[in-house]
Amino acid sequence: MRSYGMYDVTRGLTLALFAGVAGLALWGATQVGMQTQGRFWTALVIVATAGLLLTLATHVGTWTKGLRMRMSPTTFALAFLPVLVCVGWVLLASQPGHGWQEGRIDSWSNSMGILGLVHSVGLWRGVLAFGFGVMLGLSLDGVPEPLVADEPLYVPAQAPVADEPVTAERRWAGRRGTGVTPRAGTPSGVTTQERERVRTSD
């Protein structure tokens, strides 16, 4: 059975480290407070970042496994955008004072009959911001690197072209130039003059 001792230790320490950083971020958000609109949004951004960091801890070491981080347009449209709309709606309606678009969001919520639900969920605005960051991290995924076809180490040599047709063409061109044609009974491609030269040399 394969042992994962070192891997488990490294993964456990990595998760603990990211959890500690996320906890530190949450503590920093409490120091910022939510008394004003600026502090409100700053604190929620810090909380959302803590959720994102905690989720990204599971992707540490992705590149060492031959993977790359990716967010598909389909995942973004089906998973992240609905969460963005819902969380943004509730947070805009629950911001302190008369914040940006708060009156319009309240009016729309009242028209749809969900004003009470929006204000009830808005009491947990910090949880919403944290979950928003977690959802953003979950939308990312590690996928294998695209395979690249290896170039051949050598180029196969082409088969040599036989020179017989070329030789035959040259002989035929020579016979046509001299006006000599082979007699009957003479082997193909050998003229009478060539046969006489061979006999004389013998």
Image (cartoon, helix red, strand yellow):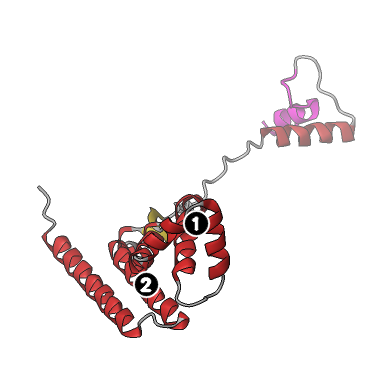
| Span shown in magenta | 186-202
Can residue 87 be seen in the rendering of this structure?
yes
Residue carrying label 1: 81
Badge 2, how many Cα within 10 Å: few under 14, some, many 20+?
many
Residue 120 falls left or right of residue 73: left
| Residue at the outermost bottom position | 31
Instruction: Work out whether mark 2 precedes mark 1 in sequence or the reverse, and give the earlier one.
Output: 2
Judge whether 48 appears above or below 147 on screen: below
Judge whether 157 appears above or below 196 on screen: below
Q: Which mark is residue 198?
A: none
Residue drawn 46% across the image and 51% down it: 75
Residue carrying label 2: 49
Residue 80 is situated, as x and y percent measured from the top left of the image, at 46, 56
Amino acid marked by disc 2: Thr
Amino acid marked by disc 1: Leu
Asked whether 151 falls inside the magenta stretch, the response is no
Residue 54 is situated, as x and y percent measured from the top left of the image, at 29, 67
Residue drawn 39% across the image and 53% down it: 144
| Residue at the outermost top position | 185
Asked whether 195 falls inside the magenta stretch, the response is yes
- For the C terminus, give its image quadrant: top right
CB atoms of marks 2 and 1 within 8 Å? no
Judge whether 56 appears above or below 139 on screen: below
Residue drawn 56% across the image and 68% down it: 103
Residue 141 is situated, as x and y percent measured from the top left of the image, at 39, 56
At numbered mark 2, what does the secondary structure look like: helix, strand or loop?
helix
As rendered, which of 121 and 12 lies closer to the eye? Answer: 121
As rendered, which of 125 and 137 lies closer to the eye? Answer: 125
Q: CA distance from mark 2 to mark 1?
A: 17 Å
Residue 63 falls left or right of residue 6: right
